[in-house]
Amino acid sequence: MISEQLTLLQQKLGKPYHDLEFLLQALKEVLVENGEAEIARYIPWIQETPPFQEAAFTNRHIQLYSIIFQLVNTAEVNAAVQQRREKENEDMRSVNGLWANNLQLLLDQGISQEDIMAHMRGVEVEPVLTAHPTEAKRTTVLEHHRDFYLLMVQRENTMFTEVEQAQIRREIKLNLYRLWKTGEIYLSKPDIQSEFRNILHYLINVFPDVVPVVDQRLMQAWEAVGLDPQALAQQEAYPTIRLGNWVGGDRDGHPFVTAALTAEVLAQLRLYAFVVLRRHLTNLVRWLSFAVTPAELSQPFQARMQAMREEMGERGEEAFRRNETEAFRQFTNLMLYKLPLHMKRGHATELEEHAGSYKLAQELIDDLELLRQTLLDFGAQSVAHTDVVQCLRIVKSFGFHLAHLDIRQNSTFHDKALQQLLKAARLESGDFMEWNEQQRRAFFNEELAYNRPFTHRNVELGDNARAVLDCYHVLEKHTRQYGTLGIGALIISMTRSLSDLLAVYVLAREAGLTQETEEGLYLPLPVVPLFETIEDLEEAPGVMHDFLSHPFTKRSLAAIQKLRGYAKPTQQIMIGYSDSNKDGGILASQWHLYKAQARLQQVGEDHGVTIKFFHGKGGSISRGAGPTHYFIRALPHCSVDGNIRLTEQGETIEQKYANKINAAYNLELLTATAVSTTILNRFTTKQAHPLSDVVEYLARESQRHYRNLIEGEGFIPFFRQATPIDALEMSKIGSRPSRRTGTNSLDDLRAIPWVFSWSQSRYNMTGWYGVGHALKKLKDTNPDGFGELKKAVKHDVFIRYVLTNIDTSLSATDEGIMKAYASLVQQEEIRERFLSLFLQEFEQTRDILAELLGRPIEERRTNHYYSTYLRNTIIEHLHHKQIALLRSWRQSAEKPDDRNPDCLVDLLTTINALSSALGTTG
């Protein structure tokens, strides 16, 4: 018997919920067939289920619900893909954010084909994968989900016979059984190597296959909007897609990221870059089966072929002897043999330099360019413009490093390292940690005039100094051998002053990373500030003016411009969405990020420097998440000036890139919107935000209200008791500690568990608190301003983006569940006071936002509304079980002898299940 709720969704939204019915029936069959008929009775929506009884709701019920919510997610994602395909089939331009839609947007603005190509080829996008602890599912479970999704895609294929469809159904059931029998949670923290292996999966098996798809879709869209595909192919006017990685490089508050680990990760990235390149060159060998001898082709082609043979000696002769009457294959075989790989049983197992092997990616690019030109001269235009260009694009995207490895460390850690270094050098310079900014600048300016170390390698150093220098020695060795392109940036979190940036130059000099010219020293690696708190965002333009004015920085940017082929000196700046939200609430965070970008871009313009913004976003709205195309379009004018980097953290990696269809869609959203936004910015006049005074007022008032809450007496006890923060701190989701230094304070708590805990208890306050108060005050004191804001919702991209995200956070908030978690707070006065504040602000925000946005949410966001409606029919069981477990676990903590070891496991399983149900963690 299908429930009323599921029937309603099938009538309203169709396909995803018919698919869900199929999956739930399959799961029920699996359980019954394997002797689990009793637990199968609890599968909702397709049958009458027993009434919920908390005491009888065991770990197995929690796991069942977790799998059911994962099935809901899969059905909805698969249906969204199919619906996009159907929509595109009618008109490619109709899917917002994709190539055809963005190209049409440019054409509608009167921008010509030639101008689009001229600007598009200079655009570069870079998703940076991180292992922030927001992916609650084990890697093994993720692997089962990848297989499961592919089976769902196969089920869509109408070419399969009934017998074949029956086999797919059997395989789906088998996969469901594996999921049921696989432990849901990490019982011990994953080590960094296992996190890196998960990232490698995407870098090796997903992105190299998806980048060509994004190019192909650009070509299809180009033709669909009436542009000349031949012109695009001939000019190779494609934007550049690169990848970044933090795993093995991000050591901010992460003591397990050692110099040895960084060296291992750099070596692995280089090895697997060649594995990817070998795969694509092998395909090229297979495709270039033209019967032609070298003598029939151009002199430069013959000369290069001969040179490669001589460079490699016997290896070159072996490569040349293959395919003797097929010159293009011979040439490609020679390129294959020049890859520095050692092969065992047909597999690339380790790096091995040999005579004539490639040193730099540009050497391979030059050979591929020669091959492409020779094919064009030969008359094989289509092969040159597709097969060879595809291989070229892979080399340009992944190079010999696969993904840029960023090195991140906290500014305070660097300060301690410098103090220890000066102490080891026995310099009578006092306590560096106590120096003011003026003293630090004077010291750094003097030191950076000379290429002299403070110590030598055999001197005993403090732990901070040794950690920094050991890491930098690894970078020095790697860049000396292979060049600098494999290193993304040296990122300084909690950057607050010029001295925080100059400190990195001095530390790099100590490790031999700096280089010398007639003009003075420079560092060939980008030094990147990370501005995180609201105060730091406000101070950022002044810090960057001083930094870009510094002669050491000028020399370094000039060197990096030459090394990386930039048109202008380019300075990367990272901005943090998480800590600014934790600091001042969502509205203040979003506005200060917006203002900082506009002001920083102007600083760059004043210095003749391109500012490349790196957006440190998370997977929740509170930490910067939102639809990619809307996010980019909502950025201030010229924030996206041909370059954009952004982090893909934790569960967002799996949500966006777990399967290649979705991966291609999300990468296309990012690339196509970055291209169109860049071009539109260059063809329109920069202006201040038209409602800047109104939004400034809202940001100020919302921040004041938010700060009053979190600084209120008793707030920390309320937070620690009304949310599962203590259980999250015991979870094994990621390798990184939940606190930077171990101090038990809000300031030290990382933003991820802060957001995660409010999400689990359905307060979601990080996504809306303070907004209702500010809007109500604006309406009461400035009704004209409120009226202008209401009008702007319809056409202002930034305002609509921010308010829609706040609306999403509100829709995931539940008053009843909030009250239930508040019951865990032991002090009645604290409980009632803070619960009242939350409920009052929630109601006020919900009502006034509905007034601003107009139509009810079920009309504005139908899919989201009904999906939440269905989930809510059973999600409260998980919440009530988690509350009971929290109460029991906390009581047992007071009596260690009576502690039930299974209680924490059950509690962590509820966290995992609720993460699946809510579609987010932190």
Image (spheres, rainbow, N blue to C red):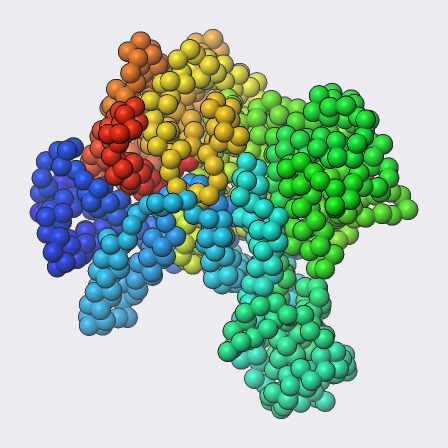
Residue 826, by quadrant, is top left
Q: Position of residue 289 (x, y in %)?
A: 56, 84
**Of 84 and 581, the residue lying toward us:** 581
**Residue 192 in view here:** yes
Q: Nearer the viewer, residue 842 or 189?
A: 189
Locate residue 767, reporting x and y percent: 42, 27
Q: Is residue 403 visible?
A: no
Res 438 quadrant in image: top right
Residue at the spot 53% in from the left edge and 76% down from the top edge: 344
Query: Percent position (x, y) of residue 914?
Result: 30, 38
Does residue 138 lie above or below 742 as drawn? Answer: below
Closer to the camera, 902 or 732? 902
Q: Residue at x 72, y 51 (%)?
A: 476
Q: Residue at x 22, y 69 (%)?
A: 167
Is residue 112 rendered to the left or right of residue 503? left
Residue 354, given in percent of the width and then of the height, sits at 69, 73
Q: In the rendered view of the protein, which quadrant contains the C terminus?
A: top left
- What's the residue at 68%, 64% (across, down)? 361
Left or right relative to 552: residue 208: left
Left or right relative to 64: residue 47: left
- Residue 210 drawn above or below residue 454: below
**Image-based side of 763 in relation to 123, left or right:** left
Q: Nearer the viewer, residue 19 or 637?
A: 19
